[in-house]
Image (spheres, grey):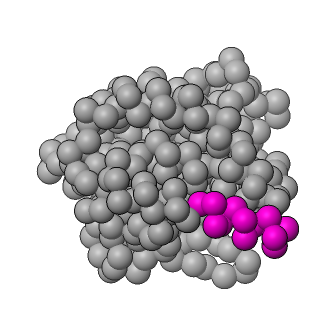
Amino acid sequence: MRDHKIPFSVSVVIPNWNGIFLMEKHLPDVIRASPGVEIIVADDMSTDGSVEYLRKNFPMVVVVERQKHEGFAACVNAGVHAASGDIVILLNTDVKPEKSFLAPLVAHFRDPGVFAVGCLEKSAEGGKIIIRGRGLAHWEKGYFIHSRGEVTGDETAWVSGGSGAFRRSAWNVLGGMDTLYNPFYWEDIDLSYRARKAGWKTLFEPKSIVHHYHEEGKIKREFTPEDVKRIAYRNQYIFIWKNVTDMSILLAHMFWTPIRLLQALFSGNLLMLGGFSMAAMRIPAIQKYRVSRHGLHTTRDRDLDLRE
């Protein structure tokens, strides 16, 4: 739907998997902060009564029921596919937006070159509030090193899939989030990187504030720290093998990867070795992607560094 204060139609998409307790806490705040906006919950085959709860208590919310549980990227893609808005805002179930977050976020899309805009996250972690939302990244020894940036700049290396706005037409051109990364992690970094490599901008808006309660999230509740780290290693390799086309970076990766794997072996880092092996099993799918999407590249990998 279109709000008269916003020059675009907007949809909010919330991926959910057994997050009824989170929606009880945060969905009313999403609705209050999004007047006149289509709100979609994409449910990834929850077994906790999430769908029934939504239909009983929030009949204005569009519920997309998936028939196969796959993970974050697939669930988000299903929600975006059902959306009608020009701009799609992704919010995790453990995110609560402030009441004024919407307008400054969406205003950036007046620039047709903007693909996505990230929110400022006040993230509750370990009893502290950490300010997040803007990412830095650079290539080093054939690896994509990413980190949290100061929230003083207007450009970000990626926009979080848990609290960000995306231009739906460009999303469709890019093919959405890549399900190779299921069940989680790196899919939003990958999507933003592909957008930047295709010539679109990814920005950060400090006036669009959300509160992110990481420790309530499903990943921490459903997966062990070892599982999470192994999947993160796997997805790091998938990202590099999918996206890099600069020969200098590829050669550096080929040189340093055996060294890193040997270091992991001698130090007993079986999680890195396991992640590498899991990524290697997906090489055929990675190669298929590289062939199909190569024509979208307009920017060199070396030119996509964002260091400050």
> Which residue lies at the image location 55% right of the left edge and 29% below the top edge?
285
Whether residue 216 is situated above or below residue 222 in the rendered picture: below
In magenta segment, residue 143: no
> Is there any visible trace of residue 22 in the rendered image?
no
Q: Give the residue displayed 81% in from the left and 70% down from the top.
A: 266
**Whether residue 80 is situated above or below residue 299 in the rendered picture:** above
Closest to the observer, 186 or 253: 253
- Left or right, 36 with respect to 80, comes to left
The answer to whether one can see residue 126 in this image is: yes
Q: Residue at x 30, y 40 (%)?
A: 167
- Residue 136 on image: x %, y %: 41, 71
Q: Looking at the image, which residue sits at the far left?
A: 111
Number of numbered discs overlaid on the protein picture: 0
In the image, farthest residue toward the top:
67
Name the residue at 82% across, 30% down: 47
Q: Which residues are magenta?
A: 257-269
Which quadrant would the N terminus be assigned to in this image?
Answer: top left
Asked if the magenta segment contains residue 263, the reply would be: yes
The spot of residue 229 in percent (x, y) is 73, 59
Q: Is residue 37 left or right of residue 129?
A: left
Above or below, 18 against 93 in this view is above
Which one is in front, 91 or 57? 91
Q: What secondary structure is the stretch in magenta mostly built from?
A: helix
